[in-house]
Structures are given as structure tokens and as C-alpha cells.
């Protein structure tokens, strides 16, 4: 059973860079797309972007200028960096595995980690 | 703003049927997937493709699509179905992903 676990600081100062890592266990990171999705408190889900295990990426146009997603296949991990954060970036951040089967689907999710942007 | 629009909230009597809709131009070309999210938990995939349920999802959940609208139907709603539901698909460019605005389902 594939499991995903997010890790990283729960508090980030405004204008700094948010950094999170997702560790994949129970399966290889190879041959899949790996995504970051966030949810501000009390609001809906927002797709941030994905990375293919080979390193190709695709980002939400509204966040593209501030987002970098990278992968470390040797550690079975992928990471998110979001620069110049503001209070609007406060959210629960989820990592998930994207799969194509009659459309896009996310069948495996991490538990989510709350990141608060505050001084 | 999301390119996939859902009604903010719907209610259903216990044991009755409720349909949740997701509207967007991209749905004319791409399938939607549907996610159930309970408070404090990660979303769970309930329907994908034309009408496919992952293992473990009760058969009271079903999906359909027509034109620019995808629908999730719960037939015989149970108390444990009370949750937020989100659709997901590609955006109108086809290049990116987008979630619907979400629907809160209340079981009365």
C-alpha cells in the first residue's frame, strides 16, 4: 500500500520561502506523476502542480512564478518550494499521486500539513 | 477563480438520493473525478472516469456526464456520506488541473 507523508516547517515568515517534502513509501516514485495540492482554512482545494519522476513539471499558472517542485528518486521523495509567501499562502498542503485512468485521478494522498504564514 | 463550478451546499434526507453537479467547459472534452472530504481528513477518491468506483467505495456512489456537466449521485444517502465533495479535471486549456469549488452535503 502506497503511503505519502508531508514534512516541513509549520510556520513560515512573510516574504520567505515555504519548503515541504513528501516521502513516498510502499512503492517506487518512478513511473508516476506526483502532485502538490493545498487548501486554505475553510476553503476549497487548489492544485499547485506536479512533477514526473523524470523531472518534468507542470505548475498552476497563478502560482508558476513562485513555485518549484523537484524530485529525488534515490530517496523516494519530492519537494515543494513556494517563494515570497504571504498570509494568503496559509493552508493545509497535501501531496498526492496523480494517475491517468479514464481521466486524471488522485488515489493516494498524504495526511496534509498545515503551514501558517505569520511573523 | 475555479473553472469548475459546483453548488455550495445541498441537503438530502437519510436514505434519499442526491445529485451533485460540476460545470465547466473542459468537461466537454475530459472526464471528471470526484473526491469526498470529511473534516480534518484528506480527500478520498470516490468516482473517476465515466463511472468507476475505486475498491472500497460503496455502490451507492455513481457518476455521469453530459455536455459541460459532470454529476455525482448518492443513491440512498447515509449519515456517513455527510462531507464536502470536490470534482477535478483539466482546465480549459487542457494543460493544467483544476478542482471544483466544492459542495457541502448535509444528510438530514
Image (cartoon, coloured by chain):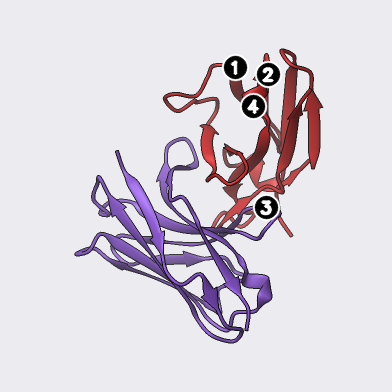
Q: Name the image quarter holding the C terminus of chain B.
A: top right
Pick whichever, B76 or B73, lies toward us. Answer: B76
Where residue A36 appears, as percent x and y from the top left, is 48, 60
- Chain letter for the residue marked with disc 1 in the picture: B
Residue to which mark 1 is pinned:
B60
* Chain B colour as displayed: red
For label 3, the SS is loop
Is the same chain shared between marks 1 and 2? yes
Q: Are marks 4 and 2 in contact (CB under 8 Å)?
A: yes
User: Which disc, if any, is residue B81?
Assistant: 4
Residue to which mark 2 is pinned:
B77
Tell me the CA gap for discs 4 and 2.
6 Å
Looking at this view, name the residue that lies furthest to the bottom.
A15
- Picture residue at 47% right of the left edge, 35% below the top: A102
Q: Are marks 1 and 2 in contact (CB under 8 Å)?
A: yes
Is B97 above or below relative to A71?
Answer: above
Residues packed near mark 1 inside 10 Å, few (<14), some (14 to 19) or many (20 plus): few
Is the same chain shared between marks 4 and 2? yes
- Chain letter for the residue marked with disc 3 in the picture: A
- Picture residue at 62% right of the left edge, 25% below the top: B80
Residues packed near mark 3 inside 10 Å, few (<14), some (14 to 19) or many (20 plus): some
Chain coloured purple here: A
Select label 1 or label 4 by which is in front: 4
Residue to which mark 3 is pinned:
A44
Q: With B82 as the anchor, is B34 left or right in this view?
A: left
Question: How many numbered callouts?
Answer: 4
Is A89 above or below relative to B54?
Answer: below
Q: With A62 as the anchor, is B105 left or right in this view?
A: right
Pick whichever, B53 or B106, lies toward us. Answer: B106
Pick whichever, A29 or B91, lies toward us. Answer: A29
Amino acid at each position: 500500500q502506497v503511503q505519502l507523508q508531508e514534512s516541513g516547517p509549520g510556520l513560515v515568515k512573510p516574504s520567505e520561502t515555504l519548503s515541504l517534502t513528501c516521502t513516498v513509501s510502499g512503492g517506487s516514485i518512478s513511473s508516476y506523476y506526483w502532485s502538490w495540492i493545498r487548501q486554505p482554512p475553510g476553503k476549497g482545494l487548489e492544485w499547485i502542480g506536479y512533477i514526473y519522476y523524470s523531472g518534468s513539471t507542470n505548475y498552476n499558472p497563478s502560482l508558476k512564478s513562485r513555485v518549484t517542485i523537484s524530485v529525488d528518486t534515490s530517496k523516494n521523495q519530492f519537494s515543494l518550494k513556494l517563494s515570497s509567501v504571504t498570509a494568503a499562502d496559509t493552508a493545509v498542503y497535501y501531496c498526492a499521486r496523480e494517475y491517468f485512468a479514464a481521466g486524471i485521478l488522485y488515489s493516494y494522498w498524504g495526511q496534509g500539513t498545515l503551514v501558517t504564514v505569520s511573523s | 477563480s475555479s473553472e469548475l463550478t459546483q453548488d455550495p451546499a445541498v441537503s438530502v434526507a437519510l436514505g434519499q438520493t442526491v445529485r451533485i453537479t460540476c460545470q465547466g467547459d473542459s468537461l466537454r472534452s475530459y472526464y471528471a473525478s470526484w473526491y469526498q472530504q470529511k473534516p480534518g481528513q484528506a480527500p478520498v477518491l470516490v468516482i473517476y472516469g465515466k463511472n468507476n468506483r475505486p475498491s472500497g467505495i460503496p455502490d451507492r456512489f455513481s457518476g455521469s456526464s453530459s455536455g459541460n456537466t459532470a454529476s455525482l449521485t448518492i443513491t440512498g444517502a447515509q449519515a456517513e456520506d455527510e462531507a464536502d465533495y470536490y470534482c477535478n479535471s483539466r482546465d480549459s486549456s487542457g494543460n493544467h488541473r483544476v478542482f471544483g469549488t466544492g459542495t457541502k452535503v448535509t444528510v438530514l
